[in-house]
Image (spheres, grey):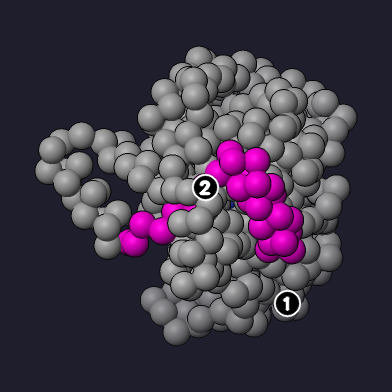
């Protein structure tokens, strides 16, 4: 069973979307379930509506899940499991105050060593703990650090080994008795029987903690981990919220197609048999072994290229409907413009301008008016050359004097694809275009 576990704390990042896509593909290949778990236990960081937004985005990419779960619904289970660990003396109550811990952190920093929990509360007697609880002293629950190294082999990055001190005796239940991220995540992975976890490499340091939690809870089934390398921006820094293109919502607003975004994210740092492909195609050949260990650099131009490719592949009628038309020929018309436009937002004004009322006020306005009157009275011409010759002869215009105003009249723009090609698709509407 695989899962995608987003936190509803902001706009969906392309790195997260890549994680979702790859989990989905591997689930399809293994013929296993793909679950979505909204990790909403950190109430202070949750943003209202982001969960819905994430689910909508997954739908747009056709990443259909076999169930959506909200982590907060499992709160009592997480607490129950923490109590079980306390009872079994695998976890302990810690009453160190945030100030004390902060002072120890500062001290470690001054001494240029990594901060580790002092272990002071681990050996408190039953009586001491009872007295503390009765006195209402705030406490957290910590899991005892492991007794030996935690090792795992990542499917992408290879072998890792973490010493007990690196894992440390970490907090699993906070003062308000809510579970920490690592605890809730590990408990739920165990409860949902997740045996393969694919996520971003920023989680590598959480992995030994989560393995330790699951072991302490008696879950000894092997989990395969695959940590995907980060995505870098043009300055070789990790793509962050500050990079517009890191937001899936922004990419949609710019007019990028889900198929192109998905294609691009699967191409990043990967060896693929073809450059342009769809999700069902990727399911047939995707292999984690082909993902490179190193970070991949985001390239907006490449995404623009793929967007054009997916527009070219798009069903004509569907493309036409994106502009509010139903005639498939207008989809073909839009495809002519892919020489000069890559996204829906670039394409749309060009197509809309063809059907919008024309501006007869400029330098070429006079000739445009003359040509418009001729077109209004002219019969239907199947061939562009006959249409053009008729106007040329009737108006007595040729060369630039003919083509400049004719283009402006038919397309609302000074430049664009060959008029001859455009004519193929607009000829049924020709009299409506010259107003
Ligand atoms: N909620 C975590 C995140 O969004 C999930 C990490 C994981 O997949 O375990 O980064």
Q: Quadrant of the C terminus?
A: bottom right
Front residue of this view, candidates 193 and 379: 193
Residue 207: percent from left, percent from top: 54, 33
Front residue of this view, candidates 255 and 52: 52
Disc 2: which residue: 92
Residue 188: percent from left, percent from top: 71, 47
Q: Secondary structure at mark 1?
A: helix
Q: Quadrant of residue 88?
A: top right
Question: Residue drawn 53% across and 61% down?
Answer: 130
Q: Residues within 10 Å of mark 2 (few under 14, many from 20)?
A: many
Residue 432 has which mark? 1
Q: Residues within 10 Å of mark 1 (few under 14, many from 20)?
A: some
Specify start and end residues of the magenta stretch as a single range: 72-98
Task: Work out whether residue 195 can be spotted.
Answer: yes
Most prominent secondary structure in the magenta stretch?
helix
Drawn side of residue 69 relative to residue 360, left or right: right
Front residue of this view, candidates 77 and 186: 77
């Amino acid at each position: 069973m695989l899962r995608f576990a987003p936190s509803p704390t902001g706009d969906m990042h392309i790195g997260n979307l890549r994680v979702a896509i790859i989990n989905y593909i591997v689930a399809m290949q293994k013929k296993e379930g793909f679950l979505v778990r909204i990790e909403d236990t950190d109430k202070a960081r949750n943003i209202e509506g982001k969960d819905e937004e994430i689910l909508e985005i997954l739908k747009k990419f056709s990443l259909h899940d076999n169930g959506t779960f909200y982590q907060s619904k499992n709160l009592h289970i997480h607490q129950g499991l923490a109590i079980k660990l306390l009872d079994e003396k695998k976890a302990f109550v810690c009453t160190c105050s945030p100030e004390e811990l902060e002072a120890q952190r500062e001290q470690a920093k001054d001494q240029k060593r990594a901060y580790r929990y002092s272990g002071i509360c681990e050996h408190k007697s039953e009586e001491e703990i009872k007295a503390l609880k009765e006195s209402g002293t705030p406490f957290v629950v910590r899991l005892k650090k492991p007794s030996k190294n935690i090792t795992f082999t990542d499917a992408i990055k290879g072998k890792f080994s973490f010493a007990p001190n690196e894992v440390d005796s970490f907090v699993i239940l906070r003062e308000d008795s809510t579970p920490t991220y690592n605890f809730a995540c590990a408990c739920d992975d165990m409860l949902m029987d997740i045996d393969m976890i694919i996520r971003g490499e920023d989680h590598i340091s959480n992995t030994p903690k989560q393995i330790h939690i699951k072991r302490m809870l008696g879950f000894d089934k092997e989990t395969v981990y695959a940590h995907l390398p980060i995505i870098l921006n043009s300055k070789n820094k990790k793509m962050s919220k500050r990079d517009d293109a890191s937001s899936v919502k922004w990419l949609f607003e710019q007019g990028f197609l889900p198929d192109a975004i998905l294609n691009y994210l699967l191409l990043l740092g990967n060896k693929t048999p073809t450059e342009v492909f769809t999700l069902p195609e990727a399911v047939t050949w995707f292999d984690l072994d082909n993902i490179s260990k190193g970070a991949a650099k985001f390239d907006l131009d490449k995404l623009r290229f793929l967007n054009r490719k997916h527009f070219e592949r798009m069903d004509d009628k569907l493309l036409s409907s994106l502009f509010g038309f139903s005639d498939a020929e207008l989809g073909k018309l839009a495809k002519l413009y892919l020489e000069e436009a890559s996204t829906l937002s670039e394409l749309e004004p060009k197509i809309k301008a063809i059907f919008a009322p024309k501006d007869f006020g400029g330098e070429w306005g006079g000739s445009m008016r003359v040509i418009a009157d001729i077109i209004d009275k002219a019969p239907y011409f199947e061939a562009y050359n006959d249409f053009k010759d008729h106007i040329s002869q009737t108006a007595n215009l040729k060369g630039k004097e003919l083509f400049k105003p004719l283009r402006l009249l038919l397309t609302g723009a000074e430049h664009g694809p060959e008029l001859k090609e455009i004519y193929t698709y607009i000829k049924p509407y020709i009299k409506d275009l010259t107003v």
